[in-house]
Image (spheres, grey):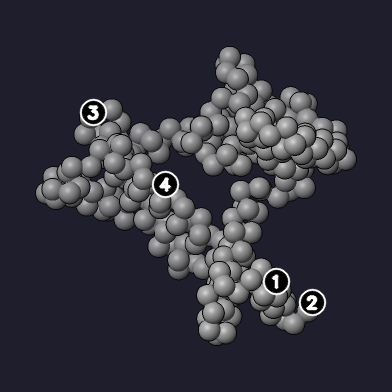
Amino acid sequence: MSAVDELRSLVARLRAECPWDRAQDIASMRPYLLEEAAELLDALDADEAEHVREELGDLLFQIVFIAQLYEERGAFDLEAAARGIAEKMIERHPHVFAGGEAGEPGSNAAWERRKAREGRSRIAGVPLRLPALVRAHRVAEKAAGVGFDWPNLAGVLAKVDEERQELAEALASGNPEEVAHEYGDLLLALANLGRFIGVAGEDALRMANTRFERRFVGVEARAAAAGVEPADAGLDQLEAWWQDVKREERGGAS
């Protein structure tokens, strides 16, 4: 018996014998799925193999558990899900597997053309629950697949400048709805900028958050060493400590 089969048997037993596991349903499993996916992202950011292995296992447990819930309904089982994704990947790679479109290399564009022939929108299938920056990136990629895109980086940068100016005008107007609208447009333009320069906006922002958190903890440590509360130190002192932390991170460079 494979390890995956053992895990499936374990989940089935938990559903049969454990009151807590038996009480779970699709709705209650959603937060755990999101949490484990986020923890796997953290592990991938750290790139520690043992941590990644552990978090992959945690996420796999959620997947097997959810498949068990649907198997109990008589809808499908994990084997059917695995078989379905295998068939989908074969269809998406006709350049690798026999039976595909002869001579067509594997690419997102090739897959989108096949999807369009089935009568589906090219942006269909991008999950609504994706983080907004990720979804902006993916939707724009699909639109770009039919040429709806800027011709070069200069065009994207000009769009960012245009949206920044429109946000400034909205702020001057004092209209909260306009401010939110234009702020969203600016974020969308920045997501497209990331796509053009090969940087995923979600990843870049997550890393920036991590840097900010690490540096702020350093500022708090300096405040504690000085015997003052950060709120009482004053902005100039907080900024000075912030710059100290940054210099330490860079090995003393200014």
Q: CA distance from mark 3 to mark 4?
A: 25 Å
- Measuring from the top left, give residue 87's x and y in whole percent: 48, 32
- Measuring from the top left, give residue 208's x and y in whole percent: 64, 59
65 left or right of 117 in image:
left
Relative height, residue 218 to residue 135 (above, below): below
According to the picture, the residue beneath numbered tag 2 turns out to be 254
Picture residue at 53% right of the left edge, 36% below the top? 89
Mark 2 or mark 1, earlier in chain: 1
Picture residue at 43% right of the left edge, 62% below the top? 53
Q: CA distance from mark 2 to mark 3?
A: 64 Å
229 or 241: nearer the eye?
A: 229
Comparing marks 4 and 1, which lies closer to the viewer?
1
Residue type, numbered disc 4: Leu
Q: Which mark is residue 211?
A: none
Residues at discs 1 and 3 in contact (Cβ within 8 Å): no
Q: Residues within 10 Å of mark 2 (few under 14, many from 20)?
A: few
According to the picture, the residue beneath numbered tag 1 turns out to be 236
Mark 3 or mark 4, earlier in chain: 4
According to the picture, the residue beneath numbered tag 3 turns out to be 74
Count of marks, rendered view: 4
Mark 4 or mark 2, earlier in chain: 4
